[in-house]
Image (cartoon, coloured by chain):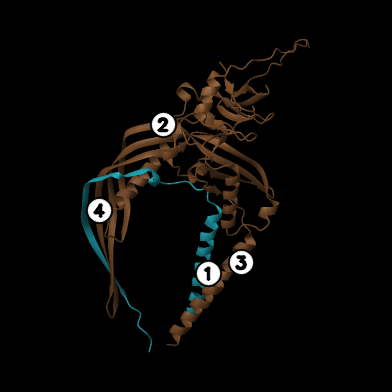
Amino acid sequence: MEIAIVIIVPAIIAFIMMFAKLSQMKTAVKQDRADNYMKRETFSVTKSKDVFLYSNTTKTPRPKSKS
Amino acid sequence: MDTVQNFKCPCCNAALPYNGETGGMKCEYCGSEFSAETLEKLMGEDASASSADSKYDWGSYTERSYEADESVNLADYSCPSCGAEITGDATLGATICPYCGNGTIIKKTFEGAAKPDYVIPFKVTKDKAMQRFEEACKKAPFLPDAFKDKRKIEEMAGVYVPFWMFDCTADADIAYKATRVKHWSTADYDYTKTDYYRAFRSGTIGFENIPSDGSQKADDTYMEAIEPYDYSEAVDFNAAYLSGYLADRYDVTAKECEPRANERVKQSTEAAFASTVTGYTDVSTETSSVRFLDGKIRYSLMPVWMLNVKYGDIMYKYAINGQTGKTVGEFPVDKKKKWLYFAKIYAIGLAVVGGAMWLMMNM
């Protein structure tokens, strides 16, 4: 189990970092939003209401250490 | 009335292109400088005499008849400098004569209802644009080393791209799903408590100058990627700014561009109101209703340097914002460099995680 963690975790990190660098090779991407064109001084919240619905609690047994 | 014009230096008659650095027209031969307004006045008052043409009788030429291709809408113009016939789309607004190199403006393209509301003139010169491209190449981490020497610049053109600019006020009613998660543990159990909420937000937010490109030829992704422009430098339209550059009238209507602008406004509005839903672990939009009020549409021309670079057998396209110099495109990837980087990070990760695991097991 420990060997699997040592092998897999660095591979995942290396893949993530490689793909992050790859994203710098293609910079022509669509802009999903219009944040640059927002007139922030006109932002006005006229209604703000948070309603609690329900709660859910899960319980997981902790692994016991073998002695 | 002349349908085509180009701008010539009043001192030496050489071609007079618009210079983004000086903000006016600068003659590349005698160095004289003029403002766009001064030149318009001079062009209006100038009455050029034409010399009498020599006549040679070659007989008549019978034109071949052909079926007009409905998908291609071409028009012919005559260069006022050399008389060469320039053929282009019916939307052609400005071009460079391929024979004499003079900038040529087709006046009727930007007259009447088709006159742009404003233009952002070129500020980045061709040399500076190439400089920005080289800087972008240096920042590309997996660029092949041979790209600099073996690439071939097929085409580099300064183009005024037609854009529709959208202003509106978004009036929104949005419902969000929100959760608050708590973790704790006892000796025997791990607990996770999740509280579920609904958050309701309503309000308004204004937007201005959301651009959407009105040209079928310009790639929408590239035109969005080179945003934003600084609209404080926008000026009333004057044909002089187009001199030395290419320009087309719009061939995508404002109506066709509206859905894209609407989608961007909607995404930004949802995100802006979501930022007011605070104190939760996770927030996501459940339903949203966004209405656009006080809508206004304007038509403008924006400066873009278009660059086509051939490397190997593939043509790579780049766009450079002609005002800010922001460069976007797709660079070729050197697979060896990419996997070498992966191996380097993996080796470091292996050492760190392996070392940490060994320490934990031996404590």
Image disc number at residue B298: 2
Q: Is residue B336 left or right of residue B109?
A: right
Which SS class for mark 4?
Answer: strand
Q: Quadrant of the N terminus of chain B?
A: top right
Q: Quadrant of the C terminus of chain B?
A: bottom left
Quick check: B345 above or below B246?
A: below
Q: Which chain has been coloured brown in this picture? A: B
10 Å crowding of disc 1: few (<14), some (14-19), many (20+): some
Image disc number at residue B340: 3
- Residue A43, picture quadrant: top left
- Residue B292, picture quadrant: top left
Q: What tint does the image give chain A?
A: cyan
The residue labelled by disc 1 is A11
Amino acid type indicated by mark 2: Arg
Name the residue rendered at 64%, 25% in the picture. Answer: B87
- Measured in 3D between alpha carbons, the distance from the residue under mark 3 to the one under mark 4, in whole angstroms, is 48 Å
Instruction: Of the two numbered discs 2 and 3 on the same chain, state the one appearing first in sequence.
Output: 2
The residue labelled by disc 4 is B198
